[in-house]
């Protein structure tokens, strides 16, 4: 580890902390229906959309109609994106004449982008036409991210409202998240990326002759516009197969910083939005503090593990200052590669600028843990906040058990219904992650995709189902997953990780909104101080440890011990 590396990490963290307040305050105004500086520009267009869609923006929904609206919108999105891929060969804006996508791959990709996962079992530049990239994948990057924000806002309203039957209007929340938050920020980021060298065109691929005399096809296209929303919406998925390690997607250190900054921006800002909407800003900063502590711990471990070369290379003249450069871009180095890996897996993004398969085993374990915890460390847009609030419900319930008092959070009594729904939400991830991993490592179609044997190959499979269920989309890069078995099982894991969590979370929102506020008393557990921050962080880590330690011990931990003993896989 170097001083320069830590300075770069510190600059990134400070930039996120500074912008959380203004962006969070702006989003609070948007979702509370207040006027913003963009209202004169976007307002007329927003009202016309409601008129065309037959939406009454003044009419709110009970949690059940809100949930049904989410599910119906997602079903229609899936069908449209699946059909677009299957009919790609006859659709316009296809200068490279890409053919139709196979049924299993189209299913996997449609589920992936609708669930905000953006797992890719294919190479984007050689599989998807411009039309599919823009009208299909990029559109889903916007609306799937907007769905996540809408769910988080609905849950926040559950805490903020008193004796209410409604939690908002999904169609209004979806529209405002897209028009007022995601679209303006994406335009700014896309223009910045174009200025820094990221391609943005509809040209056909270019055939060139290399210095060696060989022929090479240079892929290009509308890269910057898709890249901006994939990072900002924590979608992940790359226009190119190499993702943010590709020089067209990520040409230099400044674009790398912008991409990491975009991944965390909305997730961090939503903690401030939460505090503003519930009327107690310290509540938002407490959530931000928990996320920040867990994030910094992960960065320290990954950077520390990657700052030294593989011990198996000892005696080959490799300077310890070089660190482990396998699978990394020289233009980013160890520090920014380690930071990017933690950022993209702490959020549900999945974009990568280095191959996690090449990380030291303990460094590769941290991205796994980030996802297995539910990506509550800033997390995806919306998903991180509502995941953290579920853990907060469990934390105050535990605190109530300790003192023999009915737990309260933000003036709402946490009773059996909320705790049951919270536990259902938490159990979804291990059910899919461990269940599908166990299946894949005992049957031939699952074993056939492993590039490595032993513990490292097992880690590749575990990572794939962890990434899919957590709606992350990153990969260990050592698993051949574009097969009918993996396309189907990973698709099912994505569906479980997204929609089996949404239903109980919105049920919690409806239950809380209907409750009366309870005045704070001498026995009320304070949820804005260091004690609550420590308790919440502890509950998250203990829950994750009890659930996943055996699986991690069998994978990256044994892989690390084997490496020290001189054995590789």
Image (tube, rainbow, N blue to C red):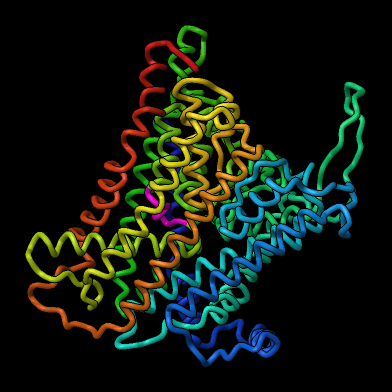
> Where residue 200 sits in the image (x, y, percent)?
79, 55
Position above or below: 16 against 1: below
The stretch drawn in magenta includes residue 378: yes
Residue name at image x 45 percent, y 10 percent:
314
Work out whether residue 191 can be spotted.
no
Q: Nearer the viewer, residue 503 or 387?
A: 503
Position above or below: 142 against 543: below
Answer with the quarter of the image where residue 277 lies.
Answer: bottom left
> Where residue 123 sits in the image (x, y, percent)?
72, 41
Position above or below: 332 against 170: above
Answer with the quarter of the image where residue 397 lies.
Answer: bottom left
The stretch drawn in magenta includes residue 114: no
Work out whether residue 400 can be spotted.
yes
Residue name at image x 88 percent, y 28 percent:
210
Answer with the quarter of the image where residue 75 lies.
Answer: bottom right
> Where residue 508 sits in the image (x, y, percent)?
34, 72
Q: Magenta region's main secondary structure?
A: loop
Give the side of residue 400 with respect to residue 217, left or right.
left
Q: Nearer the viewer, residue 394 or 388?
A: 394
Residue name at image x 56 percent, y 39 percent:
475
Residue name at image x 63 percent, y 76 percent:
179
Give the side of residue 226 with respect to residue 384, left or right.
right
Residue stretch rendered in magenta on the structure: 373-379
> Where residue 2 sits in the image (x, y, percent)?
43, 32
Give the side of residue 401 with respect to residue 231, left or right.
left
């Amino acid at each position: 580890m170097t001083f320069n590396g830590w300075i770069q990490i510190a600059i990134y963290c400070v930039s996120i902390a500074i912008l959380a307040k203004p962006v969070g305050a702006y989003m609070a105004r948007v979702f509370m229906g207040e006027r913003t500086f963009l209202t004169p520009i976007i307002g007329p267009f927003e009202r016309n959309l409601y008129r065309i869609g037959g939406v009454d923006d003044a009419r709110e929904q009970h949690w059940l109609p809100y949930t049904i609206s989410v599910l119906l919108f997602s079903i229609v999105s899936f069908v449209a994106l699946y059909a677009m891929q299957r009919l790609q060969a006859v659709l316009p804006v296809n200068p490279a004449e890409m053919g139709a996508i196979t049924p299993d791959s189209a299913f996997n990709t449609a589920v992936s982008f609708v669930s905000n996962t953006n797992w890719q079992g294919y190479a984007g530049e050689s599989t998807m036409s411009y039309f599919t990239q823009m009208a299909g994948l990029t559109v889903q990057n916007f609306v799937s991210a907007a769905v996540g924000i809408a769910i988080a806002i609905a849950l926040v309203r559950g805490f903020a409202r008193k004796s209410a039957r409604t939690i908002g209007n999904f169609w209004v929340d979806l529209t405002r998240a897209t028009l007022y938050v995601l679209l303006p920020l994406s335009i700014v980021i896309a223009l910045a990326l174009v200025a820094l060298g990221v391609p943005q065109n509809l040209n056909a691929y270019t055939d060139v002759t290399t210095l060696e005399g060989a022929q090479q096809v240079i892929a290009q296209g509308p890269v910057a516009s898709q890249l901006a929303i994939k990072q900002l919406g924590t979608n992940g998925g790359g226009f190119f197969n190499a993702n943010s390690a590709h020089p067209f997607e990520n040409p230099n250190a400044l674009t790398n910083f912008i991409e990491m900054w975009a991944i965390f921006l909305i997730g961090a800002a939503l903690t401030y939005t939460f505090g503003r909407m519930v009327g107690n800003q310290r509540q938002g900063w407490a959530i931000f503090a928990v996320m920040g502590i867990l994030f910094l711990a992960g960065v320290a471990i990954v950077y520390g593990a990657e700052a030294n070369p593989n011990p198996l290379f000892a005696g080959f003249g490799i300077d310890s200052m070089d660190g482990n450069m396998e699978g990394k871009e020289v233009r980013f180095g160890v520090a920014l590669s380690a930071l990017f890996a933690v950022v993209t897996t702490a959020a549900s993004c999945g974009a990568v600028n280095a191959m996690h398969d090449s990380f030291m085993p303990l460094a590769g374990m941290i991205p796994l843990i980030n996802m297995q915890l539910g990506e509550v460390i800033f997390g995806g847009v919306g998903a991180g906040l509502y995941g953290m609030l579920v853990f907060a419900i469990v934390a105050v319930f535990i605190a109530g058990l300790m003192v023999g008092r009915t737990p309260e959070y933000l003036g709402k009594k946490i009773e059996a219904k909320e705790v049951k729904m919270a536990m259902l939400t938490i159990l979804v991830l291990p059910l899919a992650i461990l269940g599908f991993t166990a299946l894949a490592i005992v049957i031939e179609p699952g074993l056939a995709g492993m590039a490595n044997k032993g513990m490292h190959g097992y880690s590749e499979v575990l990572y794939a189902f962890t990434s899919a269920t957590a709606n992350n989309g990153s990969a260990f890069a050592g698993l051949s997953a574009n097969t009918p078995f993996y396309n189907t099982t990973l698709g099912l894991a994505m569906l479980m990780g997204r929609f089996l969590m949404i239903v109980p979370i919105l049920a919690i929102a409806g239950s809380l909104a209907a409750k009366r506020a309870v005045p704070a008393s001498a026995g009320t557990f304070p949820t804005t101080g260091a004690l609550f921050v420590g308790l919440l962080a502890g509950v998250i880590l203990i829950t994750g440890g009890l659930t996943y330690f055996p699986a991690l011990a069998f994978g990256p931990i044994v892989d690390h011990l084997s490496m020290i003993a001189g054995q590789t896989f």
